[in-house]
Amino acid sequence: MKSIKWQAYSSLAWTEPIICPPEKCREEVEHYSRLLEKHAAIPLQALLHPGCGAGLYDHTFKQHYRVTGIDISKGMLKIAAGLNPEVRYFCSDMRTFKSPELYDAVIIPDSIGYMLKLTDLQQAIKIGYNHLKPGGVFLIVAHVREEFTENNFVYTGAKDGISITIFENNTILDPERNKYEAVFTYLIRRAGKIQIAHDRHLIGLFPRQTWLDELDKTGMQVIQERADDLYVQNVMEEGDYSMTIFIGKKSGEL
């Protein structure tokens, strides 16, 4: 497994629950849970969460399901395990994770954006599908290329005498619109001192039809939902931040 090159998921991972406490994303996670329950053909008990990060979503998911989280960042998983000792966590890549266990639901909220190439996306979808029980549901939250726009964001949080402000700039890098660059600037204040850090992430952009084609190849029935208000409160000035929820229903029943 490659080492983590992003500070956000290594040396700055500790900032995540300060910027976004679990309670802050509870409404969003409950919405995902309602969609899972609505579209599953089997009772939902076991949930697989690839790209779980610091376990902020799992803090709510665990109230409904038996959660297994996977992430490539040991720094994030350390925070997640402390926040959710009931949850099983594995350090693994969503493109290569293997387990003999099957799950009633698999969910990847927006971390699938780190799939830069079509082969990466195909592998992540295949792994999720292969770990899903018949009658289960696969939920992905993603950008679609046609709707993505450049934006600036600001996030703030404070705890135990530490205040953090993060500025995020999203810029489309190439005429083909295959990816965008997300640059983060951290302003961390504590004990009268300020720390400034920068982090650069590349995020993949795929056309809507590519998402539909790749999910359709698995044989799942695919449904789309809008998710345009997830981060609107953090957008600076005027801007849109369109996202789509893709819901795949695996045929059959156990």
Image (cartoon, rainbow, N blue to C red):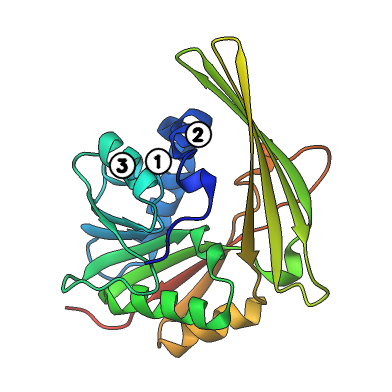
Left or right: where 57 falls relative to 45: right
Q: Is there CB contact under 8 Å for labels 1 and 2?
A: yes
Q: Residue at x 26, y 83 (%)?
A: 252
Left or right: where 130 falls relative to 27: left
Quarter occupied by the C terminus: bottom left
Q: Residue at x 75, y 71 (%)?
A: 146
Residue situated in front as seen by the camera: 35 or 125:
125
Pointer 2 residue:
20
Image height of 50 relative to 66, above or below: below
Pointer 1 residue:
56
- Who comes first in sequence, dot 1 or dot 2? 2
Q: CA distance from mark 1 to mark 2?
A: 8 Å
Kind of element beneath mark 1: loop
Pointer 3 residue:
78
Image height of 188 relative to 32, above or below: above
Residue 79 screen position, x and y as percent: 34, 38
Mark 3 or 2, which is nearer the eye? 3
Left or right: where 60 falls relative to 203: left
- Who comes first in sequence, dot 3 or dot 2? 2
The quadrant holding residue 205 is: bottom right
Circle 2 packing at 10 Å, graded few (<14), some (14-19), many (20+), is some
Residue situated in front as seen by the camera: 191 or 99:
191
Kind of element beneath mark 3: helix
The quadrant holding residue 137 is: bottom left
The quadrant holding residue 132 is: bottom left
Q: CA distance from mark 3 to mark 2?
A: 16 Å
Residue type at tag 3: Lys
Residue type at tag 2: Cys
Image height of 220 relative to 201, above or below: below
Q: Is residue 53 visible?
A: yes
